[in-house]
Image (cartoon, rainbow, N blue to C red):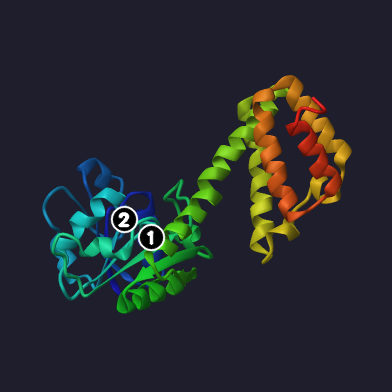
Amino acid sequence: MTRVFIWGAGRCGRTLAEALHEAGHSVIGTWNRSAEAAAKFEDAPWPAFFGDTIPPSLCDAEVVWVTVLDDVISSIGPILGNGQIALHASGALPAAALRQNGANPRAVAACHPLQSFGSTDNGAQHIRGITFGIEGEPDAVAMAEHLVKSMEAHSFVVNDDTSKALYHAACCVASNAMVALADRAVNLFEAAGVSRAQGLRALAPLILGTALNLSQTEAAEQVLTGPIARGDSAVIERHLDAISERTPQELETYKNLAQEILRLAPNTAISKLIEDYSNGNLQ
């Protein structure tokens, strides 16, 4: 059992606290900026602190897991004890952010959950089975791996600042860009006379099903379905014609995405069709 303090108990911090508690660790406290935020955790089985006063139990923690906004992380390090391991949950910042401003914890690491936390209900369920990206100093990396494994999650280690930036870019492409892509799909639904709310509701199970299929393979191309994977150029041509007629502002996005799919499932006829549309030969 490890004594852990969560500094910054928003969605991510609260979820981690619940998962750590269920895994058998001692969550000796959480901290929030405001009393209003702390009041949301009155039912938690650990003390919830807020405001400018440093909680006394912070000194008793073996691990302090910092889950505040990126631009605040460097200000937390100086309040930590030199016998403590400090983790932060940022996907973008290196572990060294916890050593700025004269901070001298025992060891530091970044331990970032690859998950989007939309709810704080049943934190352990949100953590179980996900992956954490870890980067930092050996003792802190070992502790992070131990905590992650105890929560029935997975982890891998990213070794340098450039790799960390690429790692975070990958996370943003998979999560944030997917939201933008879903919005583009909803635009096409809307052009077909389907409301945006209906479109989003219809897309969610499709996206979840694709994500589940991806989780069960080691090669993205094995998950591909649809007309490009089947080599059905007639269907693609109908797509292009309909988009050109009803919502031409979406045509460039569709063609670019088709090219990305063709990279995974090459097809000469469909590639030529997309090229002809790009050159204005078929519009």
In the image, residue 100 lies at what x, y percent? 19, 61
Quadrant where the C terminus is found in the figure: top right
In the image, residue 132 lies at what x, y percent? 45, 65
Q: Secondary structure at mark 2?
A: loop
Q: Residue at x 81, y 28 (%)?
A: 281
Separation of disc 1 and disc 2 at Cα?
9 Å
| Marks 1,2: beta carbons within 8 A | yes
Of residue 17 and residue 148, the one placed in the foreground of this image is 148
Q: Any mark on residue 33, and which?
A: none
Horizontal relation, residue 272 to residue 258: left or right: right
In the image, residue 86 lies at what x, y percent? 26, 67
Of residue 24 and residue 43, the one placed in the foreground of this image is 24
Q: From what the image shows, is residue 261 above or below residue 145?
A: above
Residue marked by disc 1: 16
Sequence order check, earlier mark of 1 and 2: 1
Q: Any mark on residue 67, and which?
A: 2
Q: Quadrant of residue 186?
A: top right
Q: From what the image shows, is residue 93 above or below residue 240?
A: below
